[in-house]
């Protein structure tokens, strides 16, 4: 393949661009994971990551993709045949449900139309009917990466409490952690699932379970098999900064750097940066005359925007043109919305000019692919960002 000059625009909603600082931090000789230097690194990241989840309890770090941490959250807390309440917010919620089924759990899926996030009132209604407390856990995706809708986690917590239901609350923050406000303890979540390659700006390969006491208690009684994913083995080794098996040492160097970077910028500033870029993106999309997939403004995602193409236009053909001409990758439509939508990732290490370059690439691509649209969308974003 011919060389393309300049940096590739990786504007999918994860993996995201890895900042040079993190790449340099990872570029180190591998050390003995049972030696004294490792203990220091391990303690540093195990401690630092708690501030990102806003969690006082332990955070487990797995050398695995986010899918592994989904499985870990379930296998550590539940028993074969347990009923779990899940919500069809989109493709990722559907994948998590599939995992629960294959593990011998019995998920009940509240139907959704993929244009809204998980609805607190529907979850509350279902729990209120469950007088025998057969439902053992409620599992929700915070930011549905397939649709760009973000669930209101505190309202879902309140719905569980109002129904006086003892179910565990498990939340997937794989595409929101480090991009969208999230508070494990304050919001009363029992297990939070996270991943490295989205808002945390790292390469793929690490994932997380943030816990509280209720989750730890559940793990004492749960009967699903626990081996690689077992929290107890992890927690005993983690006490001194070590792991029960070979950890992803060099990614942990990167994680330490990522935590420093998020703290230097300040998490609140990180979140408002994402809010602002998401708003600029939506204003541009509206100007183009295209439709944002998410139908509810209070659920708009600050991490990504999914956009419908008009009928008769193939979103993947547009993505292909943009990749060929401008060396930019955009997210494909997943599952039910395949071919109909494309997704712009505006999360992670991202600034005003990265956004303008991204939007310019999309606007030029729309022209080349013959998708009807109003020109001047990038100007709208420029006006908004320079205000
Ligand atoms: C990316 C993603 C996953 C899957 O993570 P992998 O690292 O691909 O296993 C799960 N849930 C959400 C919300 C995601 O965005």
Image (cartoon, grey):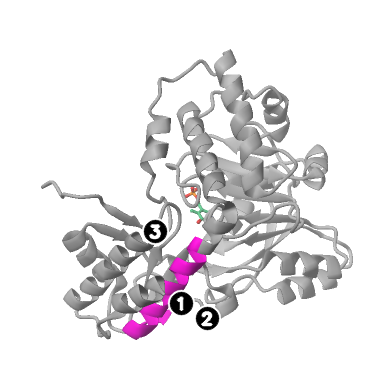
C-alpha span from label 2 to label 1: 6 Å
Q: Which residue is mark 1?
A: 293
Residue 384: x percent and y percent? Answer: 40, 76
Q: Give the x, y percent position of residue 110.
A: 66, 71
Above or below: residue 313 compared with residue 344:
below
Q: Name the residue: 35% across, 84% down.
A: 287
| Residue wearing tag 3 | 351
Secondary structure found at label 2: loop
What is the number of the mark on residue 88? none
Instruction: Mark yes or no: residue 185 visible.
Output: yes
Residue 308 lies in quadrant: bottom left
Quick one: SS at disc 1?
Answer: loop
Q: Nearer the viewer, residue 82 or 340?
A: 340
Would residue 241 appear left or right of 255 to someone viewing this image?
right
Name the quadrant containing residue 289: bottom left
Q: Nearer the viewer, mark 2 or mark 3?
A: 3
Q: Report whether residue 103 is seen.
A: no
For disc 3, the neighbor class at 10 Å (few under 14, some 14 to 19, many from 20) is few
Give the residues in magenta. 273-293
Q: Quadrant of the C terminus?
A: bottom left
Q: Sequence order check: which comes first, mark 1 or mark 3?
A: 1
The secondary structure that most of the magenta stretch takes on is helix
Q: Farthest residue to the front: give it.
A: 387
- Of 61 and 94, nearer the camera is 61
* Ligand 1 has an atom within 8 Å of the beta carbon of the residue at disc 3: no
Q: CA distance from mark 1 to mark 3?
A: 23 Å
- The image shows residue 159, relative to residue 12, as above or below, that is below
Residue at left 41%, top 79%? 283
Between the C-alphas of marks 2 and 3, the distance is 26 Å
Q: Could you tell me if the residues under marks 2 and 1 are in contact, i.e. CB atoms within 8 Å?
A: yes
Q: Please identify the residue farthest to the left as the structure is shown.
A: 2
């Amino acid at each position: 393949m011919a060389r393309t000059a300049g940096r590739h625009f990786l504007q999918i909603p994860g993996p995201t661009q890895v900042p040079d600082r993190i790449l340099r931090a990872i570029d180190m000789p591998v050390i003995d994971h049972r030696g004294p230097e490792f203990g220091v690194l391990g303690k540093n990241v195990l401690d630092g990551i708690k501030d990102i989840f806003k969690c006082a309890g332990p955070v487990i770090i797995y050398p695995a993709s986010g899918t592994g941490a989904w499985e870990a959250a379930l296998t550590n807390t539940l028993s074969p045949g347990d009923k779990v309440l899940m919500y069809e917010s989109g493709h990722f919620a559907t994948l998590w449900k599939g995992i629960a089924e294959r593990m011998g759990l019995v998920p009940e899926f509240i139907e959704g139309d993929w244009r809204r996030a998980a609805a607190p009132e529907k979850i509350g209604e279902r729990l209120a009917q469950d007088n025998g407390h057969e439902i053992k856990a409620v599992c929700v995706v915070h930011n549905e990466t397939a649709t760009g809708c973000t669930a209101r986690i505190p309202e879902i917590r309140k719905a569980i409490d109002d129904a006086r239901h003892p179910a565990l609350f498990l939340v997937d923050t794989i595409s929101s952690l480090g991009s969208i406000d999230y508070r494990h303890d304050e919001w009363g979540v029992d297990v939070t699932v996270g991943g490295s390659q989205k808002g945390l700006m790292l390469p793929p390969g690490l994932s997380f379970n943030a816990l509280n006491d209720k989750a730890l208690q559940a793990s004492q009684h749960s009967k699903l098999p626990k081996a690689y994913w077992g929290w107890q083995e992890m927690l005993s080794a983690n006490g001194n900064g070590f792991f029960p098996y070979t950890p992803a040492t060099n990614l942990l160097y990167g994680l330490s750097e990522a935590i420093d970077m998020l703290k230097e910028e300040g998490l609140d500033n990180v979140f408002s940066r994402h809010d602002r870029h998401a708003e600029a993106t939506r204003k541009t999309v509206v100007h183009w005359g295209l439709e944002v997939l998410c139908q509810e403004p209070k659920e708009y995602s600050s991490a990504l925007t999914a956009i419908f193409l008009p009928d008769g236009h193939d979103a993947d053909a547009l993505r292909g043109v943009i990749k060929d001409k401008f060396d930019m990758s955009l997210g494909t439509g997943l599952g039910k919305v395949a071919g109909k939508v494309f997704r712009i990732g505006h999360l992670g290490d991202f600034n005003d000019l990265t956004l303008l370059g991204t939007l310019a690439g999309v606007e030029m691509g729309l022209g080349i692919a013959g998708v009807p649209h109003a020109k001047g969308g990038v100007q709208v974003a420029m006006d908004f960002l320079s205000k």
